[in-house]
């Protein structure tokens, strides 16, 4: 019911011209930059990209940030359209099979923040591991961590317990050892990407390969930034030296593979509690020019270049809802939902 209300409201705003008017006001404010944060491709991405290309000035990340901080006047032929950057975190296979295809089709630049350790190993991403493992289990009672879970009714509870254990490890070595142990306890295994996947059907949630990354970058439509070596939650790591390694080495590995400087970084998970002071210090020490968070806001020219905000990109929502969200028109719907929450339970 809530999603239906959002679509109805967004349709009203769009058809009455309110969405366009709100965007017009944003275009005429002080210099701003909107950065969208996607993860997977597919879903409604194609229709969203068509809308964004019509109404925003989509730019490469580094080009857009250089313009934002230079404060030079926008060229007249751009009609003051609001600049927008598309970013994808982690580097999933569907970024290549779907995202890359759409970027070329619509001639839209995209930046992907990738994790060299996963690209090289082909391992399943740790934050997807619990759901993937539990999904493979038969419908029967399962014992884990001295507690019995009745499947299928407690499948979600078991998945959440496993994820919590993995998420709060204090080193990458501890996390990887725990993942091995969990697979042995449950008797199931995580998928692994083969080194050469040409001509094979591949799980869209597995990581990209270096060959795919070089192919995408060669077109000029896709650029890449660093996202740590192994995607730990930086503030949870107990050793500051490991934090610095994850941040610094990811840049070095990317530069070695791509053959040019890498200046941008995306914090894993990306909120302050996941980054911490040691995460920010590591990014400063590593010499990045720009770093993006998942704090939801639009960037003004006074924004800290190592603390840039991004709005969420959601391939599951209709483009007309996304259009209203990006100009801040659906906040009233959220407030109505909170006030009358009991009516939205079904």
Image: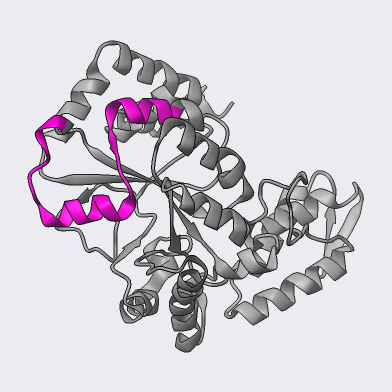
Residue 2: x and y in percent read 48, 25
Name the outermost residue toward the top.
16
Q: Quadrant of residue 75?
A: top left
> Does residue 88 appear to the left or right of 168 in the view shown?
left
- Of the 4 image quadrants, the one containing the C terminus is top right
Up-down: is 103 above or below 193? above
Residue 119: x and y in percent read 62, 64
Residue at 78% across, 60% down = 190
Residue at 44% across, 41% down = 313
Residue at 61% across, 58% down = 211
Q: Quadrant of residue 232?
A: bottom right
Up-down: is 127 above or below 321? below
Up-down: is 94 above or below 235? above
Q: Quadrant of residue 266?
A: bottom left
Residue at 43% across, 78% down = 248
Magenta highlight on residue 57: yes
> Does residue 182 appear to the left or right of 209 in the view shown?
right
Residue 132: x and y in percent read 75, 53
Q: Nearer the viewer, residue 159 or 194?
A: 194
Magenta highlight on residue 121: no
Q: Nearer the viewer, residue 315 or 6?
A: 315
Q: Nearer the viewer, residue 88 or 146?
A: 88
Snapshot colouring:
one colour
Residue 274: x and y in percent read 44, 67
Numbered range of the magenta stretch: 48-77
Q: Is residue 41 visible?
A: yes
> Does residue 63 appear to the left or right of 159 in the view shown?
left
């Amino acid at each position: 019911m809530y999603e239906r209300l959002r679509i109805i409201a967004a349709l009203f705003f769009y058809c009455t011209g309110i969405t366009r008017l709100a965007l017009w006001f944003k275009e005429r404010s002080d210099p701003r930059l909107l950065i969208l944060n996607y993860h997977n491709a597919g879903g409604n991405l194609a229709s969203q990209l068509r809308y964004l290309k019509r109404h925003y000035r989509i730019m490469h990340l580094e080009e857009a940030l250089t313009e934002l901080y230079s404060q030079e006047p926008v060229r007249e032929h751009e009609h003051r359209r609001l600049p927008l950057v598309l970013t994808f975190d982690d580097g999933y296979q569907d970024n290549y099979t779907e995202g890359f295809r759409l970027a070329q089709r619509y001639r839209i630049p995209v930046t992907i923040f990738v994790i060299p350790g996963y690209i090289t190993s082909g391992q399943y991403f740790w934050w997807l591991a619990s759901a993937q493992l539990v999904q493979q289990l038969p419908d029967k009672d399962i014992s884990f961590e001295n507690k019995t879970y009745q499947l299928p009714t407690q499948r979600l509870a078991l998945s959440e317990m496993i994820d919590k254990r993995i998420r709060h490890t204090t080193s990458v070595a501890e996390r990887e050892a725990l993942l091995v142990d969990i697979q042995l306890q449950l008797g199931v295994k995580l998928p692994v990407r083969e080194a050469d996947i040409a001509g094979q059907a591949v799980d869209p949630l597995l990581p990209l390969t270096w060959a795919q990354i070089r192919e995408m970058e060669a077109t000029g439509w896709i650029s890449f930034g660093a996202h740590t070596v192994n995607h730990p939650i930086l503030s949870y790591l107990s050793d500051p030296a490991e934090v610095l390694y994850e941040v610094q080495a990811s840049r070095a590995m990317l530069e070695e593979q791509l053959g040019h400087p890498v200046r941008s970084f995306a914090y894993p998970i990306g909120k302050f509690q996941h980054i911490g002071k040691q995460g920010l210090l590591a990014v400063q020490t590593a010499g990045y020019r720009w770093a993006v968070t998942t704090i939801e806001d639009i960037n003004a020219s006074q924004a800290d270049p190592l603390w840039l905000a991004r709005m969420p990109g959601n391939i599951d929502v209709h483009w007309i809802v996304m259009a209203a969200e990006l100009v801040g028109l659906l906040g009233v719907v959220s407030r109505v939902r909170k006030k009358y929450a009991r009516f939205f339970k079904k």
